[in-house]
Image (tube, rainbow, N blue to C red):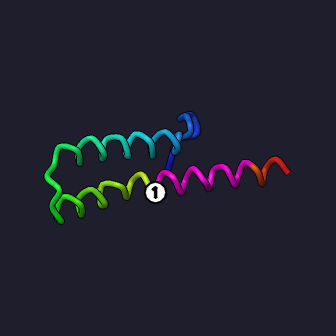
Amino acid sequence: MSNANEAPTDHRQEALDVLAAAMTSYGERHHTPEAVAIYVADQIPAIVHALLYVGDQLAERGNAR
């Protein structure tokens, strides 16, 4: 649980950062099935942050009404 004094997480930026890191590390690997599987697994945190970002946006719109 987050502390009330902490700044909210910027899930959009977190997703972009994770994707950039995964793409960089994937570019250094060979194009094998194992490397592709690892690349896909590396995307999971980005997907989670992207979904949280969408949730944050929906919550803001709901609060604005």
Residue 55 falls left or right of residue 3: right
Report the residue at 51% width, 52% height from top.
50
Report the residue at 23% width, 60% height from top.
36
Q: Is residue 59 magenta?
A: yes
Q: Which image quarter: residue 52? A: bottom right
**Residue 63 locus on image (x, y percent):** 78, 50
User: Most extreme residue toward the front, as rendered?
Assistant: 31
Q: What SS does tag 1 mark?
A: helix
Please rate how many residues cluster around mark 1, counting C-alpha atoms within 10 Å: few if below 14, some from 14 to 19, many from 20: some
User: Most extreme residue toward the right, as rendered?
Assistant: 65
Residue 39 falls left or right of residue 20: left
Report the residue at 27% width, 56% height from top.
39
| Residue 25 to residue 62: above or below | above
Q: Which image quarter: residue 27? A: top left
* Between 34 and 58, the one nearer to me in the picture: 34
Amino acid type assigned to the residue bearing label 1 in the image: Val
Q: Is residue 39 magenta?
A: no
**Residue 62 locus on image (x, y percent):** 78, 54
Report the residue at 18% width, 58% height from top.
35
* Between 22 and 57, the one nearer to me in the picture: 22
**Residue 16 locus on image (x, y percent):** 44, 42
The residue range painted magenta reads: 47-60
* Between 46 and 32, the one nearer to me in the picture: 32
Q: Which residue is mark 1?
A: 48
